[in-house]
Image (tube, rainbow, N blue to C red):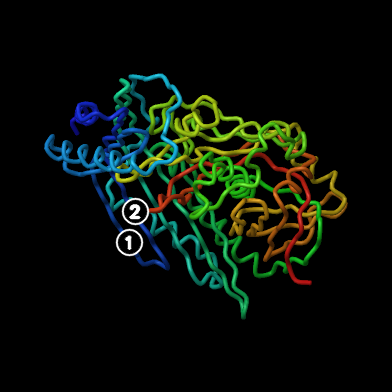
Amino acid sequence: MDKDLALFAVDQASKLGADYADARLEDHYNELIIVANGKVQRGVINRKSGIGIRTLVDGAWGFQSTTDLTKKGIRQAVEIAYKVAKASSKHVQTPVKLAPANSYKTSYKTKVKTDLENLAFEDKLKQIVSWEKTLHTSKKIVRGLTEYTGIKIDKVFASSEGANINFSNSLVWISLKADSTQGDLTQSYEKTIGHSGGYEIFHRNNMEEIASEVGRKAESLLSAKAAKMERDAKIILDNDYIALLVHEIIGHPSEADRVLGREAAWAGTTWWAGKIGEKIGSDYLTAYDDPTIPGTLGYYLYDDEGVKARRKVLVEKGVLIGHMHSRETAAIFGVEPNAGMRAITFEYIPLIRMSNTFFKEGDWKKEEMIEETKHGYLVSCMKHPSIDDKRYNWTISAQEAYEIKNGELTTHLRDVALTSTAPKFFKSVDAVSEKVEILPLPGCGKGDPMQALYVGNGGPFIRGTATILGVK
C-alpha cells in the first residue's frame, strides 16, 4: 500500500477547490470461523484495500470511496466527492463549520505478541472446533456455537490541514454459546472473549475451561427458578450486565448527532438533550468514554478526523457533563472536539461513535454490597435490550440472577429482565464497587447504511433499584 496516495487524494481535492478534505487509506485482513454442533459453518479469509475521501465544499460534505488505488482511480473518486459536496451545498440550510483541531504527524501500533497471520488458519480451525465440542458438557446441551473473528487494519489518515497519521490495529474476539433443553424448557448461556492485540489472548486464557463453564452454566439454568415480578427491587448489577446498560443508556445518548436530533429517523434522539450541567443521577454515578485504554476493542489514539483521543467525561457525580463529538458538532456546541468519529472501513463515512464507555469505580467491595443488602438480587450477564428512541425507558434481560436474603446469595434465577427509566435508575444508585472491567462488545450498530463497529463497555458492580419483570 503506497501511503502517499492519501496525501495525493487530499492534494487533488484542494486543487479542485475544496475548503477541507481528508482521506483514509486502509488495508484490511479479516478472518472468520463459525462452528455449530461440530460442523464448520463458515471459514473465511478476506482481504481488501481502498480509500475513503471526504470533501467539504461551501458548507456541505461529499464522500466517495474506491478500491482502485491508482492515481487515476483516486482522482476520479476525489472528483465525485467534490461534485457531491458542491451539489449538496445548494440545499444546505446551515453550512458546516469545523471546530479547530491540531494536525498531527505520527505513527502508532496496537501491541501484538502473536500476529494473526503467523498461525495457520487450519490450526485455528481445529482449536475452535475443539472449543465448540467442549461446550457440550452433557446431553442437555443441544447446540454449541463458536464464532471467531480476527481483524488487522493498516490505516493512513491525511487531511488538507496537514495531518498524516498511521495506525496499525489488530483485534480478536470469540463468542461461545451453549443452548440447553429439558422437557419444554430451553435456556442458553454465552460469553465473549476479546481484545485489541493478537492471537495471544487465547494463550493467556484457558479456553477449554471457559467453554466448559459456558456449557455448565447453560445446564444449571434448567434447574433455576423463573424470576417473579417485583417492583422497585434492590439490585446489584455485575460488570457484564453493566456493559450493555452503559452502552445503551449512557453511550448512545451521549453521541452529539443524536442529541441534535440528526439520528431521529434512524436510531432515535436522547432524553437529556439540553441538560448539560443538570443533575441526572446520584453522586455515586460517574461515566466516561475513553479510547486510549490499550487492550480494549475501542482502542485508538486518533479518531477518523485526526483528532487526538482523550478521556471524555460524560457524567460526573450525577451531573451531565458532556457528549461525544465530531469537529462539526463541537463547533455547534462551542466545545473542543474530543475524537468521537469513526468508520468501520474506508467504504463508509465516519460517524460519532462510542469507544470504551464505562462507569467509574467506587470504594465498595462487591462482597460488602451483597452483605449489606437485606433483600435484593445479584443480576449477571447481559442478554437482550429494549430501549425507547430517547433512551429514557429501558428493559434489559439478563442471563441469570441470584436472590439475596439477609446478605447472602440464595435462589438461582432464570428468565430475568429489569426495567426502569434512565433518570430513576441513575438516581437510585447507592453503591459502586472498586474494580472496573471493560468487556468486548463487537457489533454496535449505527448509521444507514449500517456500520457494525467494535467497542468496549463495562464498569464496576453497581447497586440501585429497578423493577424485575417475571411471572406474577
Mark 2 — residue? Answer: 32
Q: Amino acid at mark 1?
A: Arg
Residue closer to the observer: 360 or 206: 360
Quadrant of residue 328 within the rendered picture: top left
Residue at 67% in and 66% down: 415
Question: Judging from the image, what secondary structure is the residue with disc 2 in?
Answer: strand
Residue 241 visible, this orientation: yes
Quadrant of residue 454 within the rendered picture: top left
Q: Position of residue 81 (x, y in %)?
A: 26, 40
Residue at 71% in and 52% down: 421
Q: Residues within 10 Å of mark 1 (few under 14, many from 20)?
A: few
For the N terminus, the quadrant is top left
Mark 1 — residue? Answer: 42
From this view, report whether residue 340 is shown above or below residue 37.
above
Is residue 39 toward the left or the right of residue 435 in the image?
A: left
Residue at 32% in and 42% down: 116
Residue closer to the observer: 314 or 229: 314
Q: Amino acid at mark 2?
A: Leu
Is residue 374 toward the left or the right of residue 306 in the image?
A: right
Q: Position of residue 382 (x, y in %)?
A: 61, 54
Quadrant of residue 138 within the rendered picture: bottom right
From this view, report whether residue 356 is shown above or below residue 467.
above
Is residue 69 toward the left or the right of residue 443 in the image?
A: left
Q: How far, Cα to Cα, is label 2 from label 1? A: 7 Å
Q: Position of residue 399 (x, y in %)?
A: 63, 59
Q: Are circles 2 and 1 on residues that touch, CB within 8 Å?
A: yes
Residue at 35% in and 42% down: 349
Residue closer to the observer: 188 or 420: 420
From this view, report whether residue 200 is shown above or below residue 130.
above
Residue closer to the observer: 340 or 122: 340
Circle count: 2
